[in-house]
Image (cartoon, coloured by chain):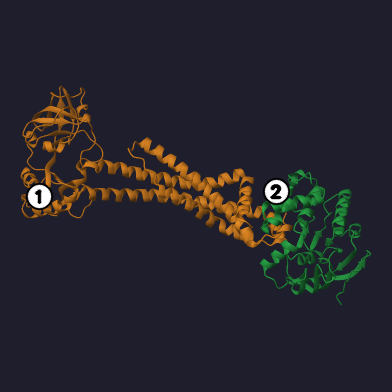
Chain colours: A green, B orange
């Protein structure tokens, strides 16, 4: 997979998103950005800068008004809702600020949930989910429900769920926002680990010290990319809009 | 998503809200149970009555003269137009086994010992053939042309002292008192023919000569075989209209009515079906209410689980998956309601037949199957809109939903 010719995990080409609330609001105003495979990118910006909209578009939850988005080399903007849902299940793993676990399901079942909708049979689901849960350090909490787990443990379950279908991209939206700083730091170490395992990570945050764990920081302001700050040693290609 | 997973997840959601699911299902349970109970009672009542009327009377034809156009059961509005001569002539027809005249003799009072009771229609004048084949508790049949009488058990016990064979009872009519000597007491008080209704009132059978009857309200013609009933009916009708003096004494708008046991049964069935249908219709309303309950609870459930729907969609659940999940949940509720309701209805129906005292208990199996089908249907109809609502939930909004 990790050939030179491998496509970017995500590539945005002059993407615009306009909401029609009374007068048009440009949530995104001509964004071009590529996230190479294996990279670790943070998106920072004040509220209203368009970072949530960017996440929704990259995560195939929403479609742009103009421009195109490629996920793992596949153009998703012209896809039907059904195909986009499939891409979302196969290629994107979500980690949310509020964890978003199913309250009635155990950790194992939560992690296995994406595989249920892909029609993977039960034995394989259990095996794969157990595997990832062990990787995030929850091998002894398989049968616990979310309300029996601490905040940090819940976020680990969510990360395991994001990884279970071996996606092209892990999307994390303020993953430490609901955690104390010590637990937050442990979660960031886990992200560093899974990045080291070769996963691509795109993280939205408004905290500088969290963003600094990434290789580069994309600063957004008023629906545009203000600047791209390179932190890591790995060279990444980023084209500005204009 | 595989059907088994679908079932598992839906079942888990139902179990997650035990009380709510139970209450929801209760609506359907009551609806289906009510329908099954009433249908069971109706079918059992029908079997009970048909059992009483049918049986040995399969080749009997009931004849009377009644007002034209009115169809209110055997003997309705009958006038005494027949004579023993009519009966004797008909008895000689081809394929006729017996022709029995039967009439109700008016009386003011009946006396026994020093006791006297007011009874207007207890005394029946007929021929001994009417009681042929009946079981006697004591004594035997009366003889033609005598003043002998046979009593039903409830007639024998209507005086202060029980009447027994060998006793004499008096029939008081105006100034006149006719003495009858009791020669037999029947085994049962049940009605012996369609002319005696469904309830066995106290009856005293005696010969026409004893009470001075020459005109009769009814004729009962027994064909020699059930297959001969139709042809016998035709020849009797022709005779009555063309030859019998009865046609001359017929009041203005009166016609001869001939009804076979089969026709009588059909008439009873028709009335009972109408009645059962009516009550079942009312029961169906409760089923509709029950299905509205399911729809309502599913809508609440969808709103409540918006966030879960968002999560499932974010991790790759298709619209169809969500639709199927919620629909399955509604159908499971409907089916459980139907099954429990059918069992409950069968039990209630059985208890009802025992309580009312029907001889027959008929469980309408086809209705149990219909109930199960209705349960599924109710689930689908009630669950469709909420499930559709759930399926079109926007994951972005759903995930933000608190």
Residue B13 disc label:
none
Residue B94 disc label:
1
In this rendering, position of residue B275 left or right of residue B384: left
Quadrant location, the N terminus of chain A: bottom right
The answer to which image quadrant residue A55 occupies is: bottom right
Q: Residues within 10 Å of mark 2 (few under 14, many from 20)?
A: some
C-alpha separation, residue under disc 2 versus residue under disc 1: 84 Å
Is residue B295 visible to the viewer in this orientation of the structure? yes
Q: Chain of mark 1?
A: B
Horizontal and vertical percent position of residue A39: 86, 64
Residue A105 disc label:
2
Q: Chain of mark 2?
A: A
> Which element is circle 1 on?
loop
Q: Residues within 10 Å of mark 1 (few under 14, many from 20)?
A: few
B195 over A27 or under it: above or below: above
Query: Which residue occupies 25% across, 38% down?
Result: B199
> Which element is circle 2 on?
loop
In the rendered image, the residue lying farthest to the bottom is A242
B285 over B201 or under it: above or below: below
Quadrant location, the C terminus of chain A: bottom right
Is residue A102 visible to the viewer in this orientation of the structure? no
Please name whichever residue, B257 or B228, is drawn nearer the observer in this view of the structure: B228
Tell us which disc is closer to us: 2 or 1.
1
Query: Which residue occupies 8% across, 53% down?
Result: B239
On whether disc 2 and disc 1 are found on a single subunit, the reply is no
Please name whichever residue, B327 or A136, is drawn nearer the observer in this view of the structure: A136
Horizontal and vertical percent position of residue B207: 9, 35
Please name whichever residue, A130 or B385, is drawn nearer the observer in this view of the structure: A130
């Amino acid at each position: 997979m990790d050939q030179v010719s491998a496509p970017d995990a995500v590539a945005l080409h002059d993407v615009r998103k306009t909401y029609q609330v009374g007068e048009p609001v440009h949530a995104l105003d001509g964004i071009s950005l590529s996230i190479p495979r294996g990279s670790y990118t943070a998106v920072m910006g004040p509220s209203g800068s368009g970072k949530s909209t960017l996440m929704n578009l990259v995560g195939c939850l929403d479609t742009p008004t103009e421009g195109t988005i490629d996920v793992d080399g596949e153009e998703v903007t012209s896809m039907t809702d059904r195909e986009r849902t499939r891409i979302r299940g196969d290629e994107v793993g979500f980690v949310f600020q509020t964890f978003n676990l199913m309250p009635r399901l155990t950790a194992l079942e939560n992690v296995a949930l994406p595989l249920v909708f892909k029609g993977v049979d039960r034995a394989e689901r259990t095996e794969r989910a157990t595997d990832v849960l062990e990787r995030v350090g929850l091998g002894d909490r398989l049968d616990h429900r979310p309300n029996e787990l601490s905040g940090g443990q819940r976020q680990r379950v969510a990360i395991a769920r994001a990884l279970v279908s071996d996606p092209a991209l892990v999307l994390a939206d303020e993953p430490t926002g609901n955690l104390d700083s010590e637990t937050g730091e442990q979660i960031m170490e886990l992200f560093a680990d899974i990045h080291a395992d070769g996963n691509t990570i795109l993280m939205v945050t408004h905290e500088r010290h969290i963003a600094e764990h990434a290789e580069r920081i994309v600063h957004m302001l008023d629906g545009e990319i203000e600047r791209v700050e390179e932190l890591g040693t790995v060279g990444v290609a980023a084209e500005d809009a204009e | 998503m595989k059907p088994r997973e679908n079932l598992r997840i839906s079942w888990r959601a139902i179990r997650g809200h035990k009380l709510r699911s139970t209450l929801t299902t209760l609506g359907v349970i009551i609806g289906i149970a009510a329908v099954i109970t009433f249908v069971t009672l109706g079918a059992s009542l029908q079997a009970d009555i048909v059992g009483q009327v049918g049986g040995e009377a399969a080749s009997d034809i009931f004849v009377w003269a009644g007002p034209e156009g009115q169809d209110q059961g055997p003997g309705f509005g009958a006038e005494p137009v027949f004579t023993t001569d009519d009966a004797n002539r008909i008895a000689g027809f081809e394929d006729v086994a017996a022709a029995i005249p039967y009439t109700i003799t008016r009386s003011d009072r009946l006396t026994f010992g020093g006791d006297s009771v007011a009874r207007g229609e207890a005394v029946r004048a007929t021929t001994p053939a009417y009681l042929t084949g009946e079981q006697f508790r004591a004594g035997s049949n009366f003889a033609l042309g005598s003043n002998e009488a046979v009593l039903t058990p409830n007639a024998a016990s209507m005086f202060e002292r029980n009447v027994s064979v060998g006793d004499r009872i008096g029939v008081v009519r105006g100034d006149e008192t006719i003495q009858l000597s009791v020669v037999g007491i029947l085994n049962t008080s049940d009605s012996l023919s369609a002319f005696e209704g469904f309830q066995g009132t106290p009856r005293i059978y005696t010969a026409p000569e004893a009470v001075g009857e020459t005109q009769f309200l009814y004729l009962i013609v027994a064909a020699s075989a059930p297959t001969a009933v139709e042809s016998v009916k035709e020849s009797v009708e022709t005779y009555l209209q063309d030859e019998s003096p009865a046609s001359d004494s017929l009041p203005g708008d009166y016609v001869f009515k001939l009804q076979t046991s089969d026709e009588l049964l059909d008439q009873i069935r028709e009335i009972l079906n109408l009645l059962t249908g009516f009550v079942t219709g009312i029961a169906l309303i409760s089923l509709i209410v029950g299905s509205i309950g399911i729809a309502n609870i599913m809508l609440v459930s969808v709103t409540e689980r918006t966030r879960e729907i968002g999560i499932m969609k974010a991790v790759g659940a298709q619209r169809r998956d969500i639709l199927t999940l919620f629909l399955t949940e509604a159908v499971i509720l409907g089916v459980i309601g139907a099954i429990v309701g059918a069992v409950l209805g069968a039990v209630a129906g059985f208890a009802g037949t025992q309580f009312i005292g029907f001889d027959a208990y008929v469980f309408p199996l086809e209705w149990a199957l219909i109930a199960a089908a209705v349960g599924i249907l109710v689930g689908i109809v009630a669950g469709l809109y909420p499930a559709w609502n759930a399926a079109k939930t926007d994951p972005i909004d759903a995930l933000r939903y608190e």
